[in-house]
Image: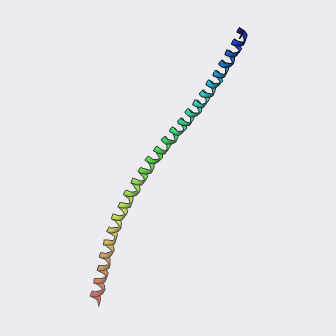
Amino acid sequence: MNEQTAIEQATRRLTQALDALDAAVERRTETDKGAVALGQQVHALAADRSKLAADLDAAVARGRSLETLNRDIARRIDAAMENVRLVLESND
């Protein structure tokens, strides 16, 4: 093998190695972009989860408040009905 052929072969191998390196860098770049996008999605989901948890806590608190109010109103209605019944009985 002469020196020119050896240089051409070395040049081809170098070109192939550089092409392989470029392809690896491109794959890594795409992987990194995917990882960044995934990280952003996870962050957005965590923020959504926090908001939903806060909304749920508020809804549960409101539900408890309404239950308490409902019991109070039911007691008042029962008392009013008893008063009406007593008035009607006293008029008979």
Name the side, left or right, on which 41 lies relative to 21.
left
Is 32 drawn above or below residue 16 in the view shown? below
Quadrant of the image occupied by residue 80: bottom left
Q: Nearer the viewer, residue 48 or 73?
A: 48
From the viewer's side, name the closer residue of 71 and 14.
14
- Where is residue 42 shown, x and y percent of the image? 49, 42
Instruction: Measuring from the top left, give residue 23's x and y in whole percent.
Output: 63, 28
Q: Quadrant of residue 91?
A: bottom left
Q: Nearer the viewer, residue 73 or 6?
A: 6
Above or below, 11 relative to 58: above
User: Residue at the spot x=42%, y=50% of the render?
Assistant: 53
Which residue corresponds to the image point at 38% horizontal and 61% vertical from the top-left? 63
Residue 60 placement, left or right of 91: right
Q: Quadrant of the C terminus?
A: bottom left
Residue found at x 33% / y 72%: 74
Image coordinates of residue 1 in percent, x first then y, are 71, 11
Question: Relative to 85, does residue 35 appear above or below in the rendering?
Answer: above
Residue located farthest toward the top when viewing the structure as drawn: 3
Placement of 91 over or under 78, stated as above or below: below
Numbered marks: total: 0
Q: Nearer the viewer, residue 13 or 60?
A: 13
